[in-house]
Amino acid sequence: MRAGAILRAWPVVIALVCGAIEAQETTTSSSSRRVHCVSDISQEFSFYMDGRFFRQYLEGHGEDARNWGSLAQLDLSNANLLALTGGDAHVPYAKESVAKVNAFLAEGGAVLMLLQSAEAPGNEVTRQHGCAATATATHGPACATPQLVRFAGDSTIEVEFRGGPTLAIESMWQPLVVDAKDQTLLALRSVGSGFLLVGSRGLFGSNPDASDPINAAWITPLLLHATKKKQVDAQKPHRSTWAEDTMQLGPLLLEFHDGTAPYAKAIADEYAAIRPHLVEITGVEPAEGMIKRLLALPTGGGGFSSGERIAIGAWWGDYPKNRYPMVELIGHEAGHSWVLPCAEPLWNEPIATYLGIQVGRRMGMKEADDTLKRQIAQARRHDPKFDKVDPLSPDAHRDLVWGKSYFVFEELERLHGPAALAKYFRKKRALLTHDRPRYTFDDLVAVWSRAVGQDLFPWFRSLGFEVRAERTGISIH
């Protein structure tokens, strides 16, 4: 949406505040100003704040570090920007964390708070300074105020807004972006020697791959302006801070912080119960050096695996009230360490979830069977007899890829079981090494053929897979 040169006549008091702030500008140019940003993922983990925010708006202007530990214990001595999200109600902003933010502002640091709702815990951080999100709906296109135009040095600023709350602000705040009814969406004020910038979440990108740097043309200069009051030492390392609490549970190191502490031990106990089932299903232990650490993530949005470490969303699926989603998630993330040394082509994600489903079935959870049947049924909408659509095709629907993969696993168990999957994983470990440059689907079918003692290429082709034995160097006999 284009704001053009729309300039509103803000009250005189705002103009005076703007002039006072502009008079504080140092002679350092924004292009040479160095930013040491800390993107906080301790109140609520998101892949976006895990590096993507910085890449979209501050790449080339300094360095970014992540805070995985308790915000109250974060060392901000060599940082000048703290990027916060509204957070999750499971991890309220502790009073010690709020005090840390205020101390950072007092010494000249800049704080950016992205609020997604009037209920977000981050409102407790900003409300004491006269700003909070509201439940009032936005109206019409968003546009820049005169102050934002001056920051950006461009009278034709374009503002893209993807939705979010309006802000209620007191008189000491400068509105920077407003909607068609002059309701504030982004505002700035000085606090102590620093600047506090609060914005509605929809003004910033959100894609985990950092492919949507919306409003970067004016967000970047705005952030450079906000960080001007505190200099950082480029010669000193700007490092991420890890979760500070650990507990050694046999060979597994459990990692957590104050906010995830209530969930961490229970999640580790679930993994301890799940692990023997994964060994039984796959017929092998995790790949060498894998799953040494388990991190409790402050999110209900899933997890990830880096091989040596798995990270699990602490309240995934409304855990601990609901247990099955957590069992499936842990089975999935841990399963990524069982498929090594070579990740599965096509179904690296489906096979991980299938392992989680199988664990649930072995533990007598009805939800596991329901999940399996539902996904296979969804796949049949795209390929009723599972004999037409090639899941390897780039345009194959996600439901088809996942559900047809599950069908293949179930059929292989039925035709070549019991424990056909375990036969496959054992053969894969015997045939493949860590230095293998590629593992293709043709390779995969060859390994399956070796595992069950039968040429499976014709069978896979009968299901629509375009596979050929001559394209793999792995013998099927």
Image (cartoon, rainbow, N blue to C red):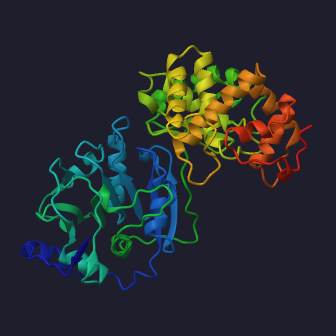
Q: Residue at x 46, y 50 (%)?
A: 74
In percent of width and height, residue 450 lies at 87, 35
Q: Quadrant of the N terminus?
A: bottom left
Q: Residue at x 58, y 38 (%)?
A: 402
- Name the foreground residue: 373 vs 463: 463
In percent of width and height, residue 293 lies at 65, 37
Q: Is residue 167 left or right of 278 when viewed as pictured? A: left
Instruction: Determine whether 306 is above or below 61 in the image.
Output: above
Q: Quadrant of the C terminus?
A: top right
Farthest top residue in view: 364
Quarter where residue 33 is shown: bottom left
Quarter where residue 413 is shown: top right
Q: Is residue 413 visible?
A: yes
Q: Residue at x 16, y 73 (%)?
A: 17
Instruction: Determine whether 237 is above or below 394 in the image.
Output: below
Q: Is residue 315 visible?
A: no
Instruction: Determine whether 334 is above or below 185 in the image.
Output: above
Q: Is residue 472 left or right of 359 when viewed as pictured? A: right
Q: How many marks?
A: 0
- Name the foreground residue: 173 vs 75: 173
Instruction: Determine whether 391 is above or below 104 in the image.
Output: above
In percent of width and height, residue 177 lies at 22, 67
Q: Is residue 191 left or right of 94 when viewed as pictured? A: left
In percent of width and height, residue 92 lies at 34, 39
- Name the foreground residue: 64 vs 232: 64
